Image (spheres, coloured by chain):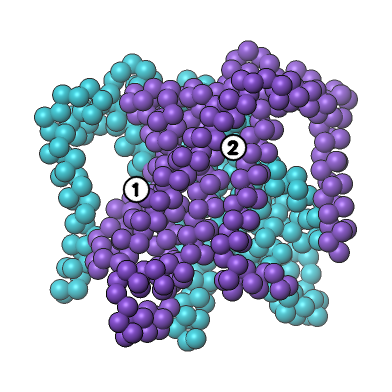
Amino acid sequence: MRRVLLRLVLACGLPAVLFTVWWVASAGSTDVYWPPLRTILTAFPDVWTADRLRGDVLPSVWRLAAGYALAAVAGVALGTLVGSHRRVRALCEPVLEFLRAVPPPVLVPVVMLFAGIGDTMKVVVIASGCVWPVLLNTVEGVRAVDPVMAETARSYGITGVARLRSLVLPSAGPQIFAGLRQALSIGIILMVISEMFAASNGLGFTVVQFQRGFAIPDMWTGILLLGMLGVVLSLVFRLVERRVLGWYHGLRASARRSP
Amino acid sequence: MRGTNAALGVAGLAGFLALAEAVPRLGLVDEEYLPPAGRIAVALGDEAADPAFWTALGDTLTGWALGLAIASCAGIVAGVVLSVVPYLRQATASTVEFLRPIPSVALIPLAVLLYGSELRSVLLLVVYASFWQVLIQVLYGVQDVDPVAEETARSYGLGPWARIRYVLWPSALPYVMTGVRLAAAVALILAVTAELVIGAPGLGQRIGVAQTSQAVPEMYALIVVTGLLGLVINVGARAVERRALAWHQSVRGEVAV
């Protein structure tokens, strides 16, 4: 009982302290840029009404999901292809290294040329930024398949889709998820940036709109909402990862217990 | 074996360039949108002859380097303090887990209001984004310290400072290096983003200007420059990592193979 209590105090103590400090320190604030936390929190429900959630937050999340899914599928598919053929890998490696090194936000102006400023542009921007970490991590993961397992599969005559499903993808799984995780934070960045650039709705657009109109407490609520979105998405990601890679974490934990 | 790989790599690069030249020339894509590689190369040459380009490159590198340095130092110090002081790690775990996934671009409006389009806006974004990369890796690294080594140091009467210096730091170093390498890439992304969106001086701002003035080849040339910069940073970070960890098993193993 005391243990549980201690853990609860440790987990909630600092956030509570920080919240209180922010609340108290900003209580009488007359600084335009740092409004009292109270003002921000009371503004929150007024700003993010159901209407706005539907009109701005939902489109943003939808674009992120579409772009991210596209990048995940393309990255894993291409990565498996490139990773399982040594020559293809050698052929593509320098080009891929270069394309990965391009900071994704500079893609926004390029994609705008081709796709205008509609939803397509945002989805393509998100997809083309997220695809590189997934692709390169898949290549690495596929390349590092345990040779003994690969030989075993070969001698049992396991080829094609069965080999892919029961050997290659599971053993590359942890790497693929590492890539997906990096891609998620890049995706959120690109979602916000592409909307700040050119959009008529969306989270990034709305927050910049508040800032330009000097609606400072409203802007702060937008920053808080963006932060919450980031936290929620990372929680969802972790749940999915724990589900899909449960066998892997279990394996590692048991390996650690019995050295 | 290595020779063939290198040759294939060069062939791949040449093929990519040829494709970038051929696709617009054949009219598969509008030349207005994707100029042939030759035109981009010419634009790149023009840029290189322009002193303003070099100033912009310098500005971007300044923002990147300063931000990375601040974030790395802060991340390492915070990571070590959090793990050495008892209970601090547990007490801060939930806060770190909450603050880390907050996208740094959420701070853009705040940066604009507070600092306008100055270097400080860039630094705010760069430091916030790269700090977590370093901190998390340091925390993992400290967790990975061999308990036997730690106990041995303790029983030989090494003080807290000596233990940090001779046990904790070397064990955590591989993780610290990974963290700094990841942070270097993230810092470049955020530096260019800040310049592009906020308009702080640098390569990103030049890309924005080229875009609004419809100077498409220049825009592509600048994008190629940011890519090359990213490439140099990645390769450089890996080289530094290998150098600093030359004694470590993971690198020694790599060399032996």
The amino acid type of the residue labelled 1 equals Leu
Q: Colour of chain B?
A: purple
> Where residue B243 sits: x, y (%)?
60, 61
- Crowding near pointer 1: few (<14 within 10 Å), some, many (20+)? some
Out of A5 and B73, give the one closest to the viewer: B73
> Where residue A216 sits: x, y (%)?
28, 23
> Where residue A222 sits: x, y (%)?
34, 31
In screen coordinates, is A253 left or right of A210?
right
Out of A252 and B91, give the one closest to the viewer: B91
- State which chain is coloured cyan: A
Based on the displayed image, in which of its 4 quarters is residue A257 positioned? Answer: bottom left
Point out which mark residue A104 bears.
Answer: 2
Tell which subunit mark 1 falls on. B
Tell which subunit mark 2 falls on. A
Point out which mark residue B123 bears.
Answer: none
Which residue is at a point 70% across and 47% down the rendered structure image?
A: A97
**Which residue is labeled 1 in the image?**
B99
Which residue is at a point 17% across and 68% down the rendered structure image?
A: A5
Q: Secondary structure at mark 2?
A: helix
In screen coordinates, is B68 left or right of A145?
left
